[in-house]
């Protein structure tokens, strides 16, 4: 018998996308779907009511917070964390269960919009490398592994990069050849090359020790006003330096002494 899979989807104003993802999961067996809302002000909650078997959780805003809240009530042996704008491949279950011995894994990526540079970015996402693997590729792992590493950090951004470093230290990471399709809305809105250069710069600074709370000001829209309260917490300070060791091909988390 296949293990039960808990699918956890954090949302904030995703009415235009989340229904499509949920509709693709309606007839699946041995799953539970948990949607964690961070305070949507559009029609997201109305859209969710179309799917009566959902578990809906109201949460404080912040992707790491929302993902942890969803995991807290999950009953599945396997956790699969998805973005609301994802389009999942037909063989998603087989891809997740193909190698049960791995610590965690993700899918490759495609973009819903057609553009030459987006195809290049998608091609690089097929490489099983920590600098080319992010949360929009649909992280999956056994519940026991998630609990072992302690869940996601409460970061406004880069919570996916941070947990990946801990998961890769626990065991092998699997990169599926099957692809999730995601929206390129941020790339289209901000400029494809400009946004990718910004992404590279932010991740590089993070790996060099910059605070994700400070970096969020360069990534999140309106990060200095009340629309993004997570990005404003002056009391939150980085507690670790995360360094990528290129020779070893892995992240190392070094504790910092934080002065009050």
Image (cartoon, helix red, strand yellow):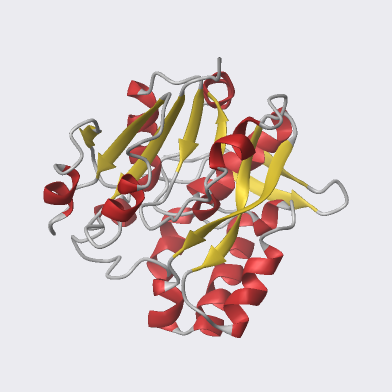
Q: Given the current orientation, which residue lies at the most extreme top position?
A: 1
Q: Position of residue 17 (x, y in %)?
A: 30, 59
Residue at left offset 41%, top offset 73%: 186
Q: Name the foreground residue: 50 vs 248.
A: 50
Residue 213 or 24: which is nearer the viewer?
24
Question: Relative to residue 251, is residue 214 drawn left or right?
Answer: left
Q: Quarter holding the C terminus? A: top left
Q: Residue 67 appears in which quarter of the rendering?
A: top left
Instruction: Establish if 219 lies above or below 88.
Output: below
Q: Is residue 186 above or below residue 35?
A: below
Q: Is residue 78 visible?
A: yes
The residue furthest front is: 27
> Can you give x and y, in whole percent of width and height, for residue 207 in the image?
64, 55
Q: Is residue 255 in view from this perspective?
A: no
Q: Position of residue 231 (x, y in %)?
A: 33, 56
Q: Is residue 235 above or below residue 196?
A: above
Q: Position of residue 19 (x, y in %)?
A: 26, 52
Between 204 and 83, the residue placed more toward the observer is 83
């Amino acid at each position: 018998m296949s293990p039960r899979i808990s699918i956890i989807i954090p949302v904030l104003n995703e009415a235009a996308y989340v229904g499509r993802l949920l509709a693709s999961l309606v007839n699946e067996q041995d799953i539970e779907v948990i949607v964690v809302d961070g305070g949507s002000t559009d029609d997201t909650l109305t859209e969710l009511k179309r799917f009566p078997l959902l578990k809906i959780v109201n949460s404080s805003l912040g992707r790491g917070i929302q993902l942890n809240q969803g995991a807290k009530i999950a009953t599945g042996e396997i956790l699969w964390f998805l973005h609301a704008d994802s389009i999942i491949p037909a063989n998603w279950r087989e891809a997740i269960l193909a190698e049960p011995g791995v610590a965690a894994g993700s899918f490759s990526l495609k973009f819903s919009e057609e553009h030459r540079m987006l195809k290049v970015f998608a091609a690089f996402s097929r490489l099983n490398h920590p600098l080319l693997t992010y949360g929009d590729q649909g992280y999956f792992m056994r519940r026991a592994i998630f609990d072992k590493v302690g869940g996601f950090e409460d970061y406004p951004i880069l919570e996916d990069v941070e947990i990946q470093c801990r998961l890769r230290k626990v065991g092998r990471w699997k990169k599926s050849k099957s692809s999730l399709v995601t929206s390129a809305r941020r790339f289209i809105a901000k400029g494809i090359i400009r946004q990718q250069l910004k992404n590279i710069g932010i991740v590089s600074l993070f790996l060099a020790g910059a605070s994700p709370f400070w970096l969020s000001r360069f990534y999140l829209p309106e990060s200095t006003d009340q629309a993004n309260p997570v990005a404003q917490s002056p009391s939150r300070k980085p507690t670790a330096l995360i360094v990528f060791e290129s020779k070893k091909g892995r992240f190392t988390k070094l504790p910092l002494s934080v002065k009050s």
